[in-house]
Image: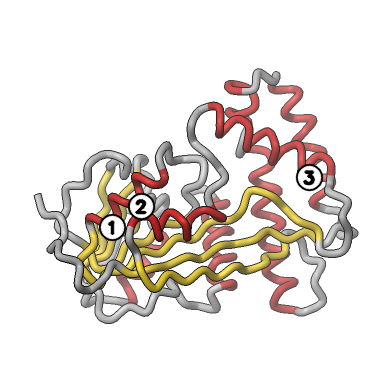
Amino acid sequence: MCPAFFLLSHVFALLYEGRLYYSPLENPHRVLDAGTGTGIWAIDFADRHPESFVIGSDLSPIQPGWIPPNLEFEVDDIEDTWRHKPFDFIHMRMMAGAIKDWPALVAQAYDNLQPGGWLEFCEFEVWVHCQNTDEVPQMIHKWQAGLTDAGERIGRTFDVAPNLKMWMEEAGFVGITENIIKVPDTPWPKDPRWKEIGLYQQQNMLDASSAYGQAHFTRVLGWSVEEFQILSAGVKRELKNLKYHMVSNLHVVYGQKPKDDGAEGVAY
């Protein structure tokens, strides 16, 4: 498994202070982790909730084989028709740039929840902000602008986090709650907890600056590999400069399918 996935999972563990979700769940019987990736979240949830049956779904079969007995991994495209019994909880995390039609995906999640079931998203905004200055790190801004441009060109937008609440409202969810957490991107905070989070987030972004986006820049925007490598080096240099008090906004958004919804879920 890629170390970056473990780093990011550790960042979430620190941010969530040990919890796995924000939704007020009550004994969920069927749970879906859509876009499960390495399956870390699904494994942790299954371990903590032996009463639940958990499905982790992803396009890539990169999950481990040794898993809890109440967990099942499947290779599937969550933008295709879902062929499951309805769920009590659907969890999606870090899917920006991977989905073609977000409103349709949210609507499909709604249709595949039991009345009273919960949907929860966790997504970072694409843009980094500076707490102490209006000056934007030039190379990081260029990197993020390029990713945004490339995503729009291929129909897989990165502009997801600020729109999640609206899409859930349009789909019919109620009791929607949006938590926006300012996550330090480098270890500039004085507070020990936030400094630790910033340290891990910095390493996560350093790793991402080398690997994440090269295909977008070279295949979509027409850059050479050498041009991207120069950009990546500049991004790394700015990430190591603690004069920039950089933060990224993390949106945790969750909502409930109405309990009095007439549908009994979608069963095939």
Residue 210 shows up from this direction:
yes
The local secondary structure at tag 1 comes to: helix
Dots 1, 2 in contact, CB < 8 A: yes
Residue placed under numbered mark 2 in the picture = 106
Q: Is residue 210 above or below residue 89?
A: above
The amino acid type, in three-letter code, at marker 1 is Tyr
The tag earlier along the polypeptide, 3 or 2, is 2
SS for callout 3: helix
Which residue occupies 55% across, 62% down?
251
Foreground of the two, 1 or 139: 139
Left or right of 212? Residue 19 is left
Q: Which image quadrant is residue 70 in?
A: bottom left
| Image coordinates for residue 79, horizontal then vertical, percent | 32, 41
Q: Distance between the residues labelled 3 and 2?
A: 35 Å
Percent position of residue 119, x then y: 35, 64
**Dot placed on the residue nearer the N-terminal end, 1 or 3:** 1
Q: Name the residue under label 1.
A: 110
Residue that label 3 marks? 236
Q: Which of 37 and 183 is in front in this view?
A: 183
